[in-house]
Image (spheres, coloured by chain):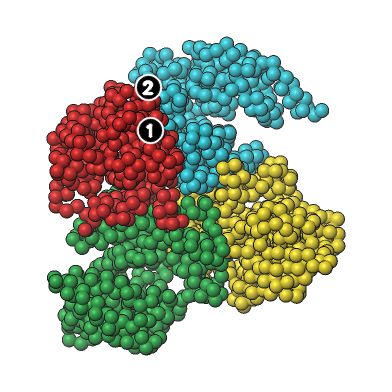
Chain colours: A red, B cyan, C green, D yellow
């Protein structure tokens, strides 16, 4: 498949771009909810609108009422979310949780997917237990208890956990903390007893939870997939999430870069447009190159993932790492080239820097993924 | 015992007697800094006691002459005092743009009466000063400033707008670059001093991406600035229309201060601390991040040596006069990189913006704050231009 | 079976029958490359057999029309042939600046007779061409070239000097930019073709830091170049005085070729291979080097995806016309970094300059060779300028 | 001590700079010997002259007939060697071997030091056994044999081994390959039986040996220091050598940088001096900063070493790594900014690149030393 959008995808891109610029823009969404100190960090009305656009169920199979689209398509929406810094449950609900639910029973799918597709429900995913992403280590325990399980432990950095109607939780049903096997995924409803959330606002105004499970009783039908068979599903969730985060990151990078290049064409210093200064030109051109490459590796990885290629695993880490580097450069150059006003809350460039930072950390930063590239390459 | 050794002994004794235990803790935030000024309040008795002890001893500005409120220490003694204060982690008794910026300008360009009048107030923490340099249209290109003072004989009428005036909303007086001759770009600027309570002065805080508002926009609407505050006390530093000389001198001084004195935190390695900190919270930094920290530590420790060398050389006039630009460039870029790495090492916990465990988002707010390092006081781009021209002697473009 | 599938089957069969086993090994050095030309000799029977089989089939230039010595393959078929050759590691049967550079220029700008005449010679490997572009005073600023052809009616008398003419000492003919109008900078250059054996042509190899001499200085001392080589065969490409159009076209083509086709080696990850290689010789790469290799592999694999995307887009006209400049910039910088890391991973063994175990210093000579990547065919600085102007639309300085 | 040269050191710097520019310059030495394919890779006459200047015995104690100077002084000479790319045995003989011999018996010092001081002798040091620097692993064995020892094993990358009158060899007298203890240093004379050298020319035209010890019989008095007590001496040799190599590296960096900055002021393209292009100006200024910092960390480390400070160990790795980065940047920018002619053998800038490469590798590259900085810092 060629590495550009086909006609349908191009049409979707046009639609998504128009919709997000109109409805999901920084003024209407990010600043709006942030300045109101919104406990969700996003707007439910927009989520509903996204459902009407058909976005929320893109990755859900047609048999389950979704559109049965792939990661290229989801990436198109995520790119626009990134560019507009649109706060929404799309990545966690429609990509991560939706990927987990693909492996769920008819019952689970029937219970949760319609709400997602309608834009009524929000889902979160709880994996990490410390401040750095380390999915190889799952200590939260789910012990057999009657017909079901009892969940004990804690999770951190659960994006939108407090807003979620259901949280996908990776827990250990056998083995020790760092074992590959023995993981089971559970769909935990929001009102589960003995689950407490400590919601904290993050630098990008999103809200994440520290969750404590203090003997949370779950029915057996809360299990997604097989008991002890959760690692593969978790890996699929992680890969989908990383590729999705990378797609959003390219949007963030492009948005920051475009805003900066525009500024270079407007701002005068020493009697010249600052875009005339060759040192800035070269840095802008280098940045452009890095962002283009990030864009390329993301679409390549999306296609591999949609094709079920084995190399999608390696390339998802390449993509996440490359995007982290490119987007990190874009926001740093962006703020520096904006000069003093880049430091003010009034200008949007700083918001890109904040979002980039949170996105970098989500599901593994450039270091984590470069290390994973080495490991998967056998060194 | 040499004079210096006995001075050290005395100093140690004096500090022991006068520096309260509470004042021997690192500064954690703005609360811990005493800025002085008309409306100043002390955050604790200890802060007050420590400030007053220093003020009375001349130790708010130890190297200034006694006549101007200082202690008249020579450079060797001043170094001993610094060492002894740093040994017990003593906090600065008074922080002030008057000390850092206006003071040096007055010491260099001021009249005797001006020095006695203004320096004394600064040393005693009576007047808090802010700096009126940048304007919305003139960032790096400072000399293009537009704020205009119309000559009305014994006074000027000043109109215009400044930006990035630090804490202007809390300050008493401003030292301010004002155009007084529109026909001469460089020799048409006057370095004026006036009270922020003068009619027509107003300020508006600027909210930064860090969420803090240490800077203001400052507006002058027909502000009447007299040309003199009494016999031998002109309301400007240096000569009328020659304020650019003062500004240039101060910019050099500022870069020197940022580059040299910065010290401590700015030159320190972070790898070990970050690794320990992560371990404490159950994390383990991956090998690639460890490598980045190691590469950073190499640069930080090497820059530390450069800082020492720079200070040693500047003392004896061996440093290239434009070297502060290099120090400022490298030091600020390094500091930005340091905080990027600290954020990475801190992981999702460092992203928290308001939580208690981060004392209200310190890691991320500090990180965002560092992004201004390479903009304020001359951008990195301007520093590189200066190095090209003045040190490498490359041809003008 | 579709047409393409049957073409693939045929091709596979043909290759099986015609590509000798010896020609299915990676090219190790110059010895393994066949350049053709009047004085060409084959290094082995297999090389000869393979070349002749391809020549007869039109596979030295498979996509050129049959009339010009090619096989007239369409893009899809050409891709299949490339894939099948690459599958068995088949070496190129003929390498030639005629194929890479002059050919595309003639195909675009040449007359029918010119094409038949020159392209056929190139396809059959009869004439080896070199390129006369750069001059000592005109590096990146190519258009400032000074070599002058004085108009003498039916011929020019050419005087001047070229530099960086690849293998000029081994080539038969040169395609050469010559100023024919001193009053018009851009529209005063002619793209001439002439025999290097013409009286007054001389060459002097340039020794490079790698120790090799793939380039020459080339001198023209009253070289008589006729304006025509027969009916419909002008001695220049395009029009007289419009050679700059041809040169620009070719530069674009060259960057595209460097950036896109480079493929293989240029886009590959190296961490695993370097680590294995080190282990074989008893070494173990330290964790910081491993991290650098990992960071490199991320960039290399991502660039590989970019290369694919670029080729896909260029095929359908979706690529920005200046995108080859970006590809060239990133690809060459990446390749330099690759060889730096390979030298580091190789340690002291990679430093050996003449030893047997390094096949005569291959690692270090290859490393040094890469330093020209970002200079030849447009420097990285020129590429960045072009991106600024043509893609980002930044104002001219 | 302030971080600049005192009056004596400044005088030495003047002398060394004049002497090396006059006698040790590229034309007279490096190119001369290289183009003659000299098997030593350096000139003995210059070595003699360096002795007359008092350089060869700078680090030798006054009691042993030397000048008893420190690493700041040796670094001054090395800086000029670096700047002029002067091939000479100074680093290996007067720094590394001389440091080892400080720990030798009266007999050993009497046997070898006068030749060094006179510029008659050349010494080499054999530590590494594989292609990467890894002094923690010493597998070459010295077994008791009669009154002496029998040496078996191999060493690689022994600079000037084939020209050396004596080679300091680090061998294992007890324990296993990676043990910290059990190392002994030996002074092996050049004509030792059963020692074979395979001399290879390196990229910078210096000559290094692969040495095989096939049961080399040594007297007991060939031992430098104590049997099994060689690790501390080896560490001292390594630290001195690394700081020396760093000092030479700063010279290489400065030489390359100055040559490049000069070129920027001469070469015209597009009707302007290329030094007028802001993008090149900024890169040159950044390079200047890096080289200045490298210079600073080197003199700081030399002073610490001369003062016997414990931190000299850590700082020697900081210095070696920082210089590697700065010098690597200097030669890369140098060749690139010279453009095509930078690729030709005729111009000197390429020679700087080659020398830098060999010097980077000598006694540990930037990666090795950054890793060591982490280890010594406890992470």
Q: Nearer the viewer, residue D150 or D128?
A: D150
* Residue D161 appears in the picture as rendered: no
The vertical placement of B182 against C200, above or below, is above
The image shows residue C396 at horizontal and vertical percentages of 31, 51
Mark 2 belongs to which subunit? B
Determine the residue positioned at 18% across, 77% down: C72
Quadrant containing the N terminus of chain C is bottom left
Q: CA distance from mark 2 to mark 1?
A: 56 Å
Q: Is residue A34 left or right of residue A328?
A: left
Determine the residue positioned at 52% across, 62% down: C279
| Badge 2 density bin: few <14, some 14–19, many ≥20, Cα 10 Å | some
* Residue A318 appears in the picture as rendered: yes
* Disc on res. A335: none
Dot in front, 2 or 1: 1
Determine the residue positioned at 28% across, 76% down: C99
The image shows residue D288 at horizontal and vertical percentages of 53, 50
The image shows residue B67 at horizontal and vertical percentages of 65, 18
Q: Is residue C121 left or right of residue A50?
A: right
Q: Is residue C246 left or right of residue D4?
A: left
The image shows residue A48 at horizontal and vertical percentages of 17, 31
Determine the residue positioned at 76% across, 68% down: D150
Q: Nearer the viewer, residue D18 or B182?
A: D18
Q: Nearer the viewer, residue C248 or B243?
A: C248
Mark 1 belongs to which subunit? A
* Disc on res. A143: 1
| Badge 1 density bin: few <14, some 14–19, many ≥20, Cα 10 Å | some
* Disc on res. B205: 2
Q: Nearer the viewer, residue D163 or D2?
A: D163
Q: Secondary structure at mark 2?
A: strand
């Amino acid at each position: 498949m060629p590495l550009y959008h086909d006609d349908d995808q191009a049409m979707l891109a046009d639609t998504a771009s128009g919709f997000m610029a109109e409805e999901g823009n920084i003024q209407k969404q990010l600043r709006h909810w942030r300045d109101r100190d919104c406990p969700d960090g996003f707007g439910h009305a927009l989520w509903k609108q996204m459902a009407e656009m058909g976005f929320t169920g893109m990755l859900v199979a047609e048999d389950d009422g979704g559109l049965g689209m792939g990661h290229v398509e989801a990436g198109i929406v995520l790119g626009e979310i990134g560019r507009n810094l649109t706060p929404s449950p799309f990545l966690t609900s429609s990509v991560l949780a939706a990927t987990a639910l693909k492996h769920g029973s008819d019952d689970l799918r029937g219970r949760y997917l319609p709400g997602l597709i309608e834009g009524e429900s929000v889902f979160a995913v709880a994996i990490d237990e410390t401040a750095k992403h380390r999915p190889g280590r799952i200590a939260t325990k789910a012990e057999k208890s009657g017909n079901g399980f009892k969940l004990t432990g804690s999770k951190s950095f659960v994006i939108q956990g407090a807003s979620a109607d259901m949280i996908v939780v990776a827990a250990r049903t056998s083995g020790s903390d760092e074992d590959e096997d023995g993981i089971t995924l559970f769909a935990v409803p929001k009102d589960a007893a003995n689950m407490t959330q400590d919601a904290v606002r993050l630098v990008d105004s999103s809200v994440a939870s520290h969750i404590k499970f203090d003997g949370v009783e779950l029915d057996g039908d809360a299990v997604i997939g097989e008991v002890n068979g959760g690692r593969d599903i978790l890996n699929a969730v992680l890969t989908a999430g990383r590729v999705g985060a990378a797609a959003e990151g390219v949007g963030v990078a492009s948005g920051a870069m475009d805003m900066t290049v525009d500024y270079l064409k407007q701002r005068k210093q020493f009697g010249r447009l600052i875009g005339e200064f060759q040192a800035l030109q070269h840095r802008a051109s280098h940045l452009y190159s890095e962002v283009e490459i990030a864009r390329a590796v993301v679409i390549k990885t999306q296609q591999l993932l949609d094709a079920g290629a084995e190399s999608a695993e390696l390339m998802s880490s390449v993509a996440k790492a490359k995007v982290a580097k490119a987007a990190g450069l874009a926001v740093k150059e962006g703020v520096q080239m904006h000069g003093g006003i880049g430091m003010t809350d009034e200008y949007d460039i700083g918001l890109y820097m904040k979002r980039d930072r949170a996105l970098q950390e989500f599901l593994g930063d450039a270091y984590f993924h470069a290390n994973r590239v080495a490991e998967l390459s056998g060194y | 015992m040499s004079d210096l050794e006995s001075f050290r002994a005395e100093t140690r004794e004096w500090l022991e007697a006068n520096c309260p235990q509470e004042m021997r803790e690192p500064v954690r935030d703005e609360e811990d800094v005493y800025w002085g000024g008309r409306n100043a309040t002390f955050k604790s008795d200890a802060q007050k006691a420590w400030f007053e002890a220093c003020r009375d001893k001349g130790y708010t500005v130890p190297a200034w002459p006694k006549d101007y409120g200082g202690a008249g220490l020579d450079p060797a003694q001043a170094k001993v005092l610094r060492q002894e204060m740093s040994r017990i982690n003593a906090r600065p008794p008074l922080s002030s743009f008057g000390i850092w910026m206006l003071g040096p300008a007055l010491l260099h360009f001021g009249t005797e009466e001006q020095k006695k009048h203004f320096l004394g107030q600064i040393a005693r923490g009576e007047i808090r000063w802010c700096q009126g340099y940048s304007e919305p249209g003139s960032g790096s290109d400072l000399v293009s400033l537009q704020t205009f003072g119309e000559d009305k004989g014994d006074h000027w009428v000043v109109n215009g707008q400044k930006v990035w005036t630090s804490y202007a909303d809390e300050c008493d007086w401003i030292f301010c670059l004002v155009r007084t001759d529109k026909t001469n770009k460089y020799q048409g600027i006057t370095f004026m001093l006036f009270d922020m309570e003068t009619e027509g002065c107003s300020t508006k805080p600027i909210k930064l991406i860090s969420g803090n508002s240490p800077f203001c926009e400052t507006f002058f609407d027909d502000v009447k600035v007299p040309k003199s505050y009494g016999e031998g006390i002109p309301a400007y530093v240096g000569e009328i229309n020659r304020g650019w000389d003062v500004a240039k001198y101060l910019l050099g001084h500022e870069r020197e201060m940022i580059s040299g004195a910065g010290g401590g935190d700015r030159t320190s390695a972070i790898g070990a601390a970050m690794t320990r900190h992560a371990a404490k919270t159950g994390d383990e930094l991956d090998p690639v991040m460890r490598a980045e920290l190691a590469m950073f530590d190499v640069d930080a420790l090497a820059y530390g040596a450069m800082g020492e060398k720079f200070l040693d050389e500047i003392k004896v006039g061996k440093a290239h006069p434009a070297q502060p630009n290099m120090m400022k460039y490298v030091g600020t870029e390094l500091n930005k990189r340091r905080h990027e790495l600290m954020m990475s090492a801190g992981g999702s916990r460092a992203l928290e913006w308001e939580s208690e465990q981060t004392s209200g988002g310190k890691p991320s707010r500090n990180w965002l704050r560092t992004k201004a390092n390479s903009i304020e006081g001359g951008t990195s781009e301007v520093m590189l231009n200066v190095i090209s021209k003045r040190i490498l002697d490359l041809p003008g473009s």
